[in-house]
Each structure stands twice: as C-alpha cells, then as structure tokens.
Image: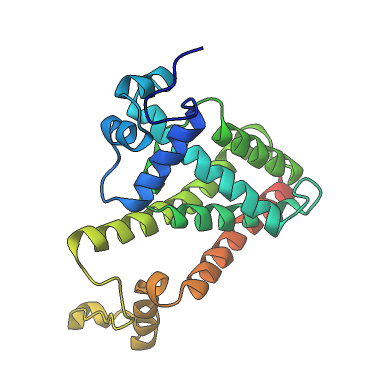
Amino acid sequence: MTRLARNRDTHLTREEIAAEALRQFDAGATAPSIRQLATALDVAPSAIYHHYPSRAAIYQAGVDLVWTEATADVLELVPDPFNAPPQETLIAAGIASRRAFMRHYRIAPYASATPAGEGMMANVIALVASLLERIALRGEAAAGAFHTYATFTFGTIIFAATRQIAHEELGGAVGDGSFSSAPGEREASFSSSATRTAIDGVIDLSAIDPERDEQLFADGLRRLVDGFVREAADA
C-alpha cells in the first residue's frame, strides 16, 4: 500500500482525478493542466501520472462522466429503454446527451475526439446499435444511420458549446433576439422577407428561448429517426 500524500486522509483514485478535471473545465477558461489538477488534489504530479498516462486520457475520463450523466437523464425520460419503442429511445438519448454536455459545455469539444474502445462511450454505442437493430437496420445500414444520427446530435452539441465558449472568450453578447440579417437587394429577391425574418429569429434561440431551442432540436431528430424507420420498411 502506498503512503498517503501529505494533507490527504484518503488515497487518490482515478475517479477523483476525472471528477476534478470536469470541475475545473466547468469553472475555468482553459483546459486544466496536470499541475493544476495535482495542486487541487494535494498530490504531486507523479501521482496523477500513476493513474493516467496523459492529459488526453484524463479529459476522456471527464467526458465519460458526462456520458454517465446523459445515461441517467435518458433513464429519466425513458425508464425502460430496451422495451420502449426504439425511435423514442433514440430521440430521448439525443436530448439527454445535449442536456448533459450543455451543462458541461467547456469539455464538450473533447467529446468529438475518437473515444477509447472501452468505457462509457462504448456502452453508449452498444445501446444505439441495439436500438437500430430493433428498427431493423443492421450492418452497413445501421452504420450509415449511426453516422447520420451522431453527426446531427454531436454536431449540434459541439456547435452550441463552442458558440458559448466563443461568446465568453471574445466578450461578445450571448444574444438578445435582436439579430436581423440585411442581404443585398439581388440576394433578397430570391426569398421572402417572412422566411428570412423567421430564420433570423432562431439565430440566437439557444440564448433567448432554450426550451424552444431544445424542441426544435427534438423535432429535427424525430424527422431523422422517422427516416430510419422508413428506410428499414423499404428495404
């Protein structure tokens, strides 16, 4: 048994390091360093490296914690995901993922890195695979559907997260609903003012009306998943 670090009454764990990394992402403007983590945990940097080989591995562990939160959120929306209609579980999974990563938006960009072959993300992939098979999409058809589903869901998450980060780091306004586009006369002649005004109204939607923003996301995801069901029926 290794000795306890000075100022600590428990041994350092992988879970403690991951939780501290996520906390620092939430609180800070920059990704935490090994030294910052060690200082916060009252250990030497070598103690961090004893559990994780690199910052990348720690960040992945932090991302896994967010996936754990998302999974809990899915179970609140769909308590029995393996017996509920698969399309409803896919939609709930997208909504839950979006909610979880927007609570931790500073670590969200790191979710786009290639995940480890095991861990929470691997379990998420297995769940989605089972849902696609229940829709009757298998093999390459399921892979194509997963690519579309993941691109829509994660792309939306990453865009919303990086937009929030950019507003904070650049000191810009988050949005007050006053956005109004002013295209040139020729460009404006190809569309109606009513359509452009409606589109202008959703530019800052995540800031001014998060509930409607989520509803539009869910509506888009439903159209996507309904397309999977039609594809399976036509096969």
Instruction: Answer with left or right where residue 91 lies relative to residue 175.
Output: right
**Residue farthest to the bottom, as pictured:** 194
Which corner quadrant of the image does residue 94 belong to?
A: bottom right
Percent from the top left, x then y, of residue 130?
71, 38
Count of picture labels: 0
Q: Nearer the viewer, residue 84 or 12?
A: 12
In front of the other: 171 or 179 = 171
Spot occupied by residue 141 in the image (x, y as percentages of width and height): 62, 38
Q: Residue 232 appears at what percent x and percent y?
A: 71, 47
- Residue 136 in which image quadrant: top right
Q: Residue at x 42, y 30 (%)?
A: 8
Residue under the image location 76 percent in, 43 percent down: 134
Could you say which is closer to the camera, residue 102 or residue 158?
102
Judge from the rendering whether residue 66 lies leftward or rightward of residue 26; answer left or right. right
User: Is residue 193 toward the left or the right of residue 8 in the image?
Assistant: left
Give the vertical position of 182 relative to 63 (above or below).
below
Colour scheme = rainbow
Q: Quadrant of residue 209?
A: bottom left
Q: Is residue 34 visible?
A: yes
Whether residue 90 is visible here, answered yes or no, is: no
In the rendered image, the quadrant that contains the C terminus is top right
**Residue occupying the far top of the picture:** 1
At x 57% / y 58%, what residue is drawn? 95
